[in-house]
Image (cartoon, rainbow, N blue to C red):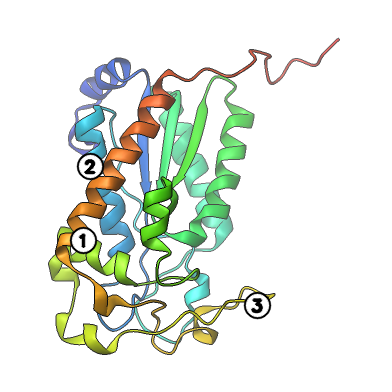
Amino acid sequence: MLCRSEHGRNLSADLESARCCAILPVGATEQHGPHLGCGMDAVLADRLCAAVAARSKVPALPTLPYGCSLGHSRRWPGTLSVQPITLIELVKQIGDWSYYTGVRRLFIVNTHVTNAAPLRCALEMLRAEHDDMMVALFNSATLSPRVRELHFADGEDWHANDAETSLMLALAPEMVRPSQLATADDPDRTAGLVFAHPVNRTSRNGVTGFPSRASADNGRRWFDWMVEDLCELIARGMLETPPLDHPYFTPTR
């Protein structure tokens, strides 16, 4: 169930049947080493949320293909970043207009690690303005313990690694250059560091991890896990109510 293919009146009916819930996929466009396409994060966001929307019947809004990728530096071509404040304001305004359309439970699904802080800021702004709107932020690599384990298996600071490469081999093989896989591996160098360094100072080729280990079979299995675990989170969120019903704007007396 994709919002972009719906007529406005049909979308209103879809929202009503989905308890006024909607999914907002957020990706990024950035370098992914010598072997993966720059749109990997956006493709994953789009495919993951489309699959979840089809299973859960919760409408998926159009995918945001740009994110906060400043950490990837200008060393490698292909990164198209926005500033954190830009992403905050963009998602805030999308959330506002989703609210006007009838959304009261918004699930933001993020597939790029450093989008997390700006998206959390947008969440704070939306719930402070719309008292009857609930907003959740899910980062795709940490949807569940099993999903986290597969993403972090080859490094805490992973990027364009086994997990991401396997997912693209399964979902969008045209995004992968198989001839580059054998020489694309680059280890995580961030263990024990105090500062968060940009990728140009932690990776030789824009990769952190071991994409040479990737396989389409693993990607299909892991994607199924991600769909299943995200559907479970959304199903819980569709029924959730706040622990207390105190209004946001009314001071205690």
Q: Earlier in the sequence, mark 2 or mark 1?
A: 2
Q: Residue at x 54, y 86 (%)?
A: 201
Query: In the rendered image, which quarter contains the C terminus?
Result: top right
Q: Is residue 118 above or below residue 57?
A: below
Left-right relation of 164 to 122: left
Secondary structure beneath dot 2 equals: helix
For mark 2, what is the residue?
Answer: 50
Say if mark 2 contacts mark 1, CB within 8 Å: no
For mark 1, what is the residue?
Answer: 218
Query: In the rendered image, which quarter contains the N terminus?
Result: top left
Residue 182 appearing in the image: yes
Q: CA distance from mark 2 to mark 3?
A: 38 Å
Could you say which disc has been placed on residue 53 in the image? none
Q: CA distance from mark 3 to mark 1?
A: 31 Å
Residue 183: horizontal and vertical position, in percent? 27, 90
For mark 3, what is the residue?
Answer: 193
